[in-house]
Image (cartoon, rainbow, N blue to C red):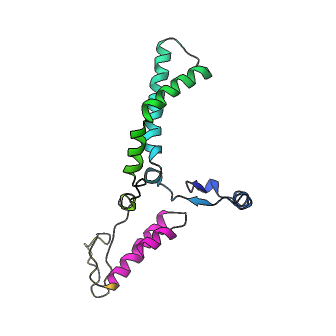
Amino acid sequence: MLIIDGHESYISAAFDQFCKEKDIITVSMPPHSSHLLQPLDVRCFAPLKRAYGREIEVLMKSYINHVTKTEFFIAFQTAFFVVFTKENVKSRFRGAGLVPLDPEVALSKLDVKLRTLTPASPPQPNDDPCVSQTSHNPTEAGSQSTFIKSRIARHHSSSPTPIYNTVD
């Protein structure tokens, strides 16, 4: 299985054919979701970049202007072990709701606002149609479900089927 970030540059007939020939199952993440689904991107790799920069600054203060492979690996290794501690990595996956699995953590961070459409009372001009409201009957619950699905479809270019199943 290959998980890709859903960027359209990855999608091509040749790529699809290659994956099919090699029995590779591809799963596309929704766009703009790496902060939810790739917790190491935001919480570890960004600090790694800063820590590596500090290591290079130390070299520059020692009048080393050209970083060879040896200096690179020493600086990178030092920065890596500062940032990628066992507890730091575990906390990132826990905070994203991935390990242990807690879908509510990720779903709570989605930009979805519920609204209730009721055929009996038309919306008032000052009403915000995207305010969460409790459903009072199956018709309202169905309207909210339809609204959520349309919001998901607008914000994601990959298959929203798993999210639709959860909404249902």
- Rendering quarter of residue 128: bottom left
Residue 26 lies in the magenta stretch: no
Q: Quadrant location of the N terminus?
A: bottom right
x, y percent for residue 132: 29, 70
- Rendering quarter of residue 69: top right
> On screen, 19 above or below 40?
below
x, y percent for residue 84: 45, 36
Going 43% across and 42% down the picture, which residue do you hit? 89
> On screen, 28 above or below 63?
below
Left or right for 140, reference 93? left
Magenta segment boundaries in residue numbering? 139-168
x, y percent for residue 68: 61, 20
Left or right for 39, reference 119? right
Residue 155 lies in the magenta stretch: yes
> On screen, 64 above or below 32?
above
Going 55% across and 54% down the picture, which residue do you hit? 5
Q: Who is closer to the viewer here, 69 or 81?
A: 81
Q: Quadrant location of the C terminus?
A: bottom left
Most common SS among magenta residues: helix
| Residue extending furthest toward the bottom | 120
x, y percent for residue 58: 46, 18
Going 39% across and 40% down the picture, which residue do you hit? 87
Left or right for 103, reference 10? left
